[in-house]
Image (cartoon, rainbow, N blue to C red):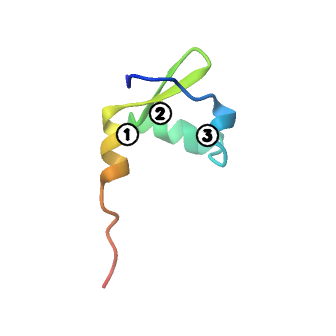
Amino acid sequence: MSVGMGLSSDKLYPAGKQTIAAMLTKGWIERNGGSYFITEAGQAALRALIPTKG
């Protein structure tokens, strides 16, 4: 789990319930009580390049 303050689901707006569930399934975030924390896998996903055609 990431060090620092967590975010409540309303702070993750515009992410909806399905998006949050998908991020949990992928291990990008973890839930602790009513807060969500970004994981190392989530940090890596944020840094990853998005492939494009071209």
**Is 2 above or below relative to 13?**
above
Q: Quadrant of the N terminus?
A: top left
Mark 1 or mark 3: whose residue is earlier in sequence: 3
Camera-nearest label, 2 or 3: 3
Which residue reaches farthest top?
33
Q: Which residue is mark 1?
A: 42
Q: Which residue is mark 2?
A: 24
Residue type marked 1 = Gly
Camera-nearest label, 1 or 2: 1
Q: Which residue is mark 3?
A: 12
Mark 3 crowd level (few <14, some 14–19, many ≥20, 10 Å Cα): few
Q: How far across and how far down the image is residue 19, in percent?
A: 57, 45
Mark 2 crowd level (few <14, some 14–19, many ≥20, 10 Å Cα): some
Q: Are the residues at dot 1 and dot 2 in contact (C-beta closer than 8 Å)?
A: no
Mark 1 crowd level (few <14, some 14–19, many ≥20, 10 Å Cα): some
* Residue toward you, 23 or 9: 9
Q: Are the residues at dot 2 and dot 3 in contact (C-beta closer than 8 Å)?
A: no
Q: How far across and how far down the image is residue 24, in percent?
A: 47, 33
Q: How far across and how far down the image is residue 21, in percent?
A: 55, 36
